[in-house]
Image (spheres, rainbow, N blue to C red):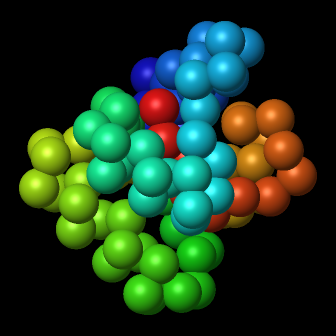
C-alpha cells in the first residue's frame, strides 16, 4: 500500500468525527495548540510562505508532513472542494 492509498483511509475517521483542521488558519491554530498529529500538504501549493508557516512548527513538534498529489485530491479526501493544508 502506498501513501496515496493510505492517506484517504487515515483521514476518513477524523473527518467523520470533526477532528480535521482545514486550511491555513485552522492548521496554524491546531499546530500552535499542540493538537496536530499529522499535517497533509498539497504538492501544488504555490505559496512558499504558507508552506514555511506550516512546516516549521511541524518540525519543532515532530509532526509528520506527508504530501498529497494535489489540492483537489486533498479536498476530496477532506470532504471539501479544494484545500492546500489539512491537520489531523
Above or below 29: residue 62: above
Q: Relative to 12, does residue 32 appear above or below in the rendering?
A: below
Instruction: Left or right? Give the position of 76 relative to 35.
Output: right
Residue 69 visible in the picture: no
Tell which of 14 and 11 is nearer to you.
Answer: 14
Q: How many marks?
A: 0
Measured as percent of width and height from the top left, residue 28 is found at 44, 58
Q: Is residue 29 left or right of residue 64?
A: right
Report whether 25 appears left or right of 57: right
Is any part of residue 66 visible from this angle?
Answer: yes
Residue drawn at 15 percent across, 46 percent down: 61
Query: Where, by quadrant of the figure, is residue 25 drawn?
Result: bottom right
Residue 58: image location, x then y, percent: 24, 54
Q: Position of residue 73 (x, y in %)?
A: 73, 50
Q: Position of residue 16 (x, y in %)?
A: 72, 14
Residue at image position (42%, 87%) is 49
**Quarter holding the N terminus?**
top left
Q: What's the residue at 66%, 12% (across, down)?
A: 17
**Is residue 7 positioned above or below 43 on the image?**
above
Q: Residue at x 45, y 52 (%)?
A: 29
Amino acid at each position: 500500500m502506498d501513501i496515496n492509498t493510505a492517506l484517504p483511509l487515515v483521514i476518513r475517521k477524523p473527518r467523520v468525527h470533526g477532528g480535521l483542521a482545514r486550511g491555513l488558519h485552522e492548521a496554524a491554530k491546531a499546530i500552535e495548540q499542540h493538537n496536530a498529529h499529522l499535517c497533509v500538504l498539497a504538492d501544488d501549493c504555490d505559496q512558499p510562505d504558507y508552506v514555511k508557516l506550516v512546516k516549521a512548527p511541524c518540525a519543532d513538534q515532530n509532526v509528520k508532513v506527508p504530501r498529497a498529489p494535489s489540492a483537489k485530491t486533498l479536498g476530496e479526501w477532506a470532504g471539501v472542494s479544494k484545500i492546500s493544508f489539512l491537520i489531523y
